[in-house]
């Protein structure tokens, strides 16, 4: 990424925050409401949410909440608060991988247990970048050609199906032309993008998030039943969840 790209991203983010603040103040002035519910990817922007809570018309002390969570919370006949903070409850079981915790919740669901009263909490999360190998100009060209070829193939197919060429060209040639042209353009774009990195990232990797352990939490009222269904000893399931 070049400095100009970082500046552009920062400008877009700043403008997004300003627009959200303007909309929030307008909504509050029109409705008089004290709580704000939002949905979508922008609602998960923690920096923008912090500015809304600090500078918006709904601050201080009022709730800025994802609308899906706001709709979910009053729909159940219990006091469990679905929030973005670490949930309260009793630790029913601890697992070394998320897949195991997921299977445990699936077992509870199959047994008609109220799984909306459970949570999976990953403790001590960390980002792990797995390096898969070198990534040079040839790799960039091949990857770009593959992506471009697929896009060109789709475009050629669309031109063939809807007969957008006049005079008409055989649909097979349209698809083939779209494939090779997309591959060439994609390969050139891949080479250019890799050249712009100036050798700062000559490797390929996969970024994942992992945790030391995954705890299955359940509300106090149903924790014993969850432990029984999972076959967890009561003594092991009696540990309260740490509060944060």
Image: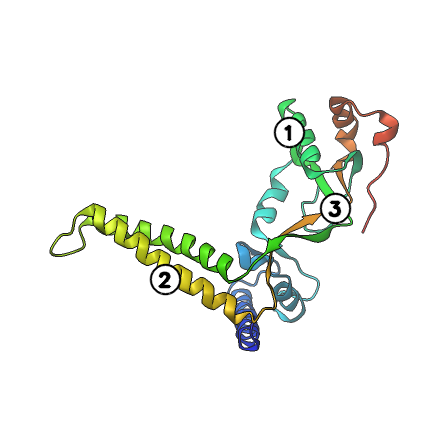
Task: Of the two numbered discs 1 and 2 on the same chain, state the one appearing first in sequence.
Answer: 1
x 67%, y 27%: residue: 108
Would you identify the image quadrant in which residue 122 lies?
top right
What residue does disc 2 label?
Answer: 185
Q: Which of 102 and 210 is in front in this view?
A: 210
**Is 136 above or below relative to 116?**
below
What residue does disc 3 label?
Answer: 211
What residue does disc 1 label?
Answer: 106
**Is 73 above or below relative to 26?**
above
Q: Distance between the residues labelled 1 and 3?
A: 20 Å
Q: Which of 16 and 161 is in front in this view?
A: 161
Percent x, y for residue 20? 54, 67
Task: Of the two numbered discs 2 and 3 on the same chain, state the one appearing first in sequence.
Answer: 2
Q: Which of 149 and 87 is in front in this view?
A: 149
Would you identify the image quadrant in which residue 148 lies?
bottom left
Secondary structure type for disc 3? loop
Instruction: From the viewer's perspective, tell me whether residue 185 is left or right of residue 122.
Output: left
Q: Residue 221 carries which label?
A: none
Q: Which is closer to the viewer, label 1 or label 2?
A: 2
Q: Do the residues labelled 1 and 2 touch (CB within 8 Å)?
A: no
């Amino acid at each position: 990424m070049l400095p100009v790209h970082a500046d552009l991203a920062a400008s877009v983010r700043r403008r997004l925050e300003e627009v959200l603040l303007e909309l929030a103040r307008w909504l509050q002035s029109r409705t008089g409401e004290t709580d704000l519910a939002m949905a979508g990817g922008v609602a998960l922007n923690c920096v923008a949410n912090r500015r809304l809570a600090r500078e918006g018309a709904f601050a201080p002390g009022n709730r800025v909440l994802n609308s899906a969570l706001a709709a979910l919370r009053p729909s159940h006949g219990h006091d469990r608060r679905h929030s973005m903070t670490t949930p309260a409850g009793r630790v029913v079981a601890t697992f070394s991988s998320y897949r195991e915790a997921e299977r445990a919740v699936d077992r509870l669901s199959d047994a008609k247990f109220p799984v909306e009263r459970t949570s999976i909490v990953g403790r001590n999360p960390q980002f792990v970048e797995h390096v898969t190998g070198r990534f040079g100009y040839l790799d960039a060209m091949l990857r770009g050609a593959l992506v471009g070829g697929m896009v060109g193939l789709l475009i050629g197919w669309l031109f063939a199906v809807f007969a957008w060429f006049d005079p008409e060209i055989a649909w097979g040639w349209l698809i083939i032309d779209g494939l090779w042209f997309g591959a060439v353009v994609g390969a050139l774009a891949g080479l250019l993008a890799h050249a712009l990195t100036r050798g700062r990232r000559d490797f390929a990797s996969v970024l994942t998030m992992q945790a030391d352990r995954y705890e299955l939490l359940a509300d106090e009222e149903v924790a014993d039943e969850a432990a029984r269904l999972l076959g967890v000893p009561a003594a092991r399931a009696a540990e309260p969840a740490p509060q944060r």
